[in-house]
Amino acid sequence: MIGLLGKKIGMTQVFSQDGKLVSVTAIEAGPCPVLAVKDRSIQIGFASVNQNRLKRPLLGFFKKINIAPRKIIKEVPKDASLEYKIGDELKVDLFKSGDFVDIKGFSKGKGFQGGMKRWNWHGGPKTHGSMSHRRIGSIGSTTSPGRVFKGHHLPGHMGMQLTTLQNLQVVKIDAQNNLLLVKGAVPGGRNSYLLIRKAKKKSG
């Protein structure tokens, strides 16, 4: 269940072994130094950051373990068959072509959106003088219960949610440039950070 942190670079196309054109997402994956070793997990870091941007307790933590400060810190379950020590680096060669991975990241933020875009509402009448084509309309709150039920689909902030896409196939890795090419799209926009783990439900 070991994982790797990465940054989405963008999408491109490559030819598969059988000659088909495949859309892939390019991810800069690792290297991720091991920052701490725990009973069932390890703490890893990714993306260098200026030490002036860190709070002193966190800066002191990096100085204590003698590792350059990292912007992103995550815990991932460790592989029981391997031994880890602080300072080890996890690289993209954890994966190989044909593997399946689960990728977690924040989806693109869409800002404040109405109900038709956010929840795919059908909308109001389109003719006969209707003035509420895309409006909320009645939401069922009368004297009893006199309030709006929690979880009601209403306009509001859309996107920017932690999302996991499962069973994405690794098309190619470039260990020299720390690149991972994954078939299809992954959550988030360009330069967003991702957590890549071996798929829970499918193996290569």
Image: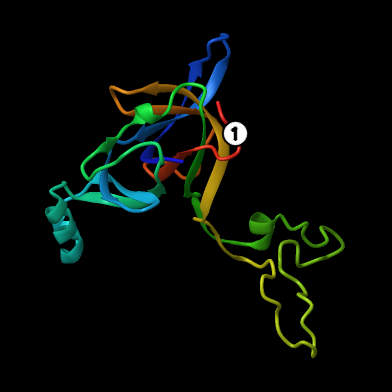
Q: Position of residue 141 (x, y in %)?
A: 77, 82
- Give whichever of 29, 142 is nearer the camera: 29
Q: Please, is residue 169 above or below residue 133 in the view?
A: above
Q: Residue at x 42, y 44 (%)?
A: 195
Q: In which quadrant is the C terminus drawn?
A: top right
Q: Please, is residue 114 above or below residue 79 in the view?
A: below
Looking at the image, what colour scheme do you see? rainbow
Q: Position of residue 137 (x, y in %)?
A: 76, 72
Choose top left, top right, bottom left or bottom right for residue 131. Answer: bottom right
Choose top left, top right, bottom left or bottom right for residue 47. Answer: top left
> Which residue corresponds to mark 1?
202
Relative to 155, is 58 on the left or the right? left
- Give whichever of 1, 124 is nearer the camera: 1
Q: Residue furthest right?
A: 128
Relative to 3, is 123 on the left or the right? right
Q: Please, is residue 170 above or below residue 14 in the view?
A: below
Q: Give the tally of numbered discs.
A: 1
Q: Residue at x 78, y 75 (%)?
A: 138
Q: Please, is residue 45 above or below residue 198 in the view?
A: below
At label 1, which amino acid type do we have? Lys
Element under disc 1? loop
Relative to 186, is 79 on the left or the right? left
Q: Position of residue 52 (x, y in %)?
A: 13, 57
- Give whichever of 24, 94 is nearer the camera: 94
Q: Residue at x 14, y 60 (%)?
A: 60
Q: Residue at x 40, y 33 (%)?
A: 27
Relative to 85, is 188 on the left or the right? right
- Give whichever of 161, 122 is nearer the camera: 161
- Pointer 1: residues within 10 angstroms few (<14), some, or many (20+)? some
Q: Position of residue 153 (x, y in %)?
A: 69, 66
